[in-house]
Amino acid sequence: MRTRMMIKISPLILAGFVAWTLVSAATQNQPVSTSKILAFENKWNAAYKHGDIAAMESLLSEDFIITLEDGSTFSKSGYIAHNGDTTLHVEITEMSGVNVRMHGSVAVVTGAYHEKGVFRGKPYEYHDRFTDVWMNKNGKWQVIASHYSIPSSD
């Protein structure tokens, strides 16, 4: 009798386990919404403005590279060191016209960027265009590349 009951229960348990596995796999493979990528962009923007090194450490890929308006480039460590410079005081960081394009485990974000502040005692202000590339690495979204340029004044 006990053997017969195990045989009847086992298919039910197996069916339940298979259903749970399929639902779980489908949930993990669902594409990330553009709103989630925008939330990451906003988190990075806020981390930069407030000098939140820990947040930047988690958002930037180990092989991150950024190209600035003057053509100079920084690695992750160089970018974080620049942001940690005590002579940098960022007052405004604003993004507008932001567009997110999803390509599987990669998101490409473009838009306009405005930054204003003081660096080494001198005021500065930028009005740029930007492109950020985010990649899902082992279930974690991180920015792998960023490029800023000054729009032409036609």
Image (tube, rainbow, N blue to C red):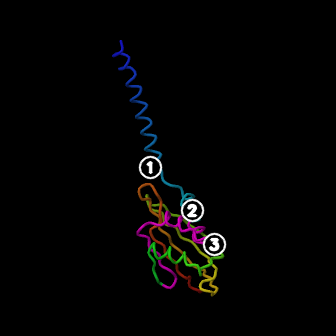
The three-letter code of the residue at mark 1 reads Asn
Mark 2 / mark 3, whichever is N-terminal: 2
Q: Split into 4 quadrants, where in the image is the C terminus?
A: bottom right
Task: Please name the residue that numbered disc 3 is placed on.
Answer: 94
Distance in Å between CA atoms under marks 2 and 3:
13 Å
Whether 116 is drawn above or below 134: the answer is below
Residue 104 counted in the magenta span: no
Which span is picked out in magenta? 43-70
Secondary structure state at the residue bearing disc 2: helix
The three-letter code of the residue at mark 3 reads Glu
Mark 1 / mark 2, whichever is N-terminal: 1
Residue 118 in the image: x percent, y percent? 63, 82
Task: Please name the residue that numbered disc 1 is placed on.
Answer: 29
Q: Split into 4 quadrants, where in the image is the N terminus?
A: top left
Q: Which residue occupies 57% across, 58% down?
A: 35
Of residues 20 and 98, the one drawn nearer to the viewer in this rendering: 20
Secondary structure state at the residue bearing disc 1: loop
Task: Please name the residue that numbered disc 2 is placed on.
Answer: 38
The three-letter code of the residue at mark 2 reads Leu
Residue 66 counted in the magenta span: yes
| Mark 1 residue crowding within 10 angstroms, few (<14) / some (14–19) / many (20+) | few
For residue 92, which quarter of the picture? bottom right
| Mark 3 residue crowding within 10 angstroms, few (<14) / some (14–19) / many (20+) | some
Left or right side of 36 for 24: left
Secondary structure state at the residue bearing disc 3: strand
Q: Nearer the viewer, mark 3 or mark 1?
A: 3
